[in-house]
Amino acid sequence: MRVAALNIASGRGSASLRDGLAPLAGCDVLALSEVDDAQPRSGGIDQAAVAAEVLGVEHWRMAPTLAGTPGLRRDWTPLAGTLRSTATDPTEADSPETDQDDDERGHPPRRRPTYGVALLVSQPVTAWHALGLGTGRGKLPLVVPDPVSGRTGVMLFPDEPRAAVAAVLTDGTVVAATHLSFAPPTALSQLRRLASWLRGLAPAGPDGATRPVLLAGDLNLPAPLVGLAAGAPTLVRAPTFPGAAPRVQLDHVVSLGAPVTATGRAEQLAVGDHRALVVDVVR
């Protein structure tokens, strides 16, 4: 099973999202962070659906963490703990990601701009799950242009709601995607909670999980802290951030269930600000 994790940074890069993700075609599992849907800043497209088309997979879910656009102000609505598939999903009209009423011409509900994580899987899925992981209180200093004056300077960005999406495959294997807080204490707490939750989704025997449980994503933690909080090491060690000249590994694939072996690499793509971590897992 080939598992990849990539922070697509809302599709920013030197190529289109479709072209940038093309090297990941053939992956069995793809965990995406910083995914936009219906956001004006990324052309209003459904980025998770585009990724599914590139990979040629039918089984995917986006776990939106907020409605609105993340930025300097907390003027968004938390959505962590919800799931969305295609824009034409008949259940979507009752979800918080759409405006509920048809317009006077009878057009279907309009999707609200959302942002979150997504999980794409090539194998059939028996169950999908979402877990809200809360919002940290920290603020991230970034050098950006001031939206009012246009002058470049250091601005403090508030943390966002965080979430995970998990799929249980037909053979009992559990795969999951997440993007944890940029504040290490918060990320550690989120990872502990998430690891326990994921282990509970897997079939268990006297010695623990009987099938693999694989967590992939931007954990915003270096490998030693991942092992400490998850109770299991990252499967492949390779720096992933920043994408152009990586110095630290923030993106991981962690095995939380039955023992597996793995090989892999960090691959620079033309989309996103991290390198993609691509891991081949063997049971």
Image: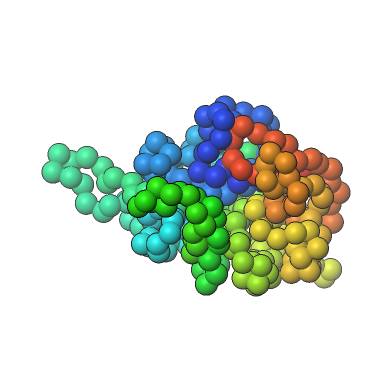
- Judge from the rendering whether residue 253 lies leftward or rightward of residue 270; answer left or right: right
At x 75% / y 52%, what residue is drawn? 248
Q: Position of residue 240 (x, y in %)?
A: 72, 46
Q: Name the foreground residue: 125 vs 81.
A: 81
Question: In the rendering, at what x and y percent does residue 250 appear?
Answer: 70, 54
**For residue 210, what is the image quadrant?**
bottom right
Q: Is residue 3 above or below residue 18?
A: below
In this view, 70 is above or below 187: above
Q: Nearer the viewer, residue 63 or 174?
A: 63
Circle count: 0
Q: Nearer the viewer, residue 154 or 208?
A: 154
Q: Quadrant of the N terminus?
A: top right
Residue 171 appears anywhere in the view: no
Q: What residue is at 18 percent from the left and 45 percent from the top?
A: 103
Query: Which coloring applies here?
Result: rainbow
**Residue 242 shown left or right of residue 263 in the figure:** left
> Quick check: 282 left or right of 21?
right
Q: Is residue 105 visible?
A: yes
Give the residue displayed 52% in from the left and 57% down from the top: 154
Q: Nearer the viewer, residue 191 or 53?
A: 191
Q: Is residue 173 above or below residue 58?
A: below
The structure residue drawn at horizontal position 63% and vertical position 39%, both measured from the top left corner, is 122
Residue 100 location (% of width, % of height): 26, 53
Expressed as whole percent of the image width and height from the top left, the position of residue 123 reads 64, 41
Q: Residue at the far left: name it.
A: 104
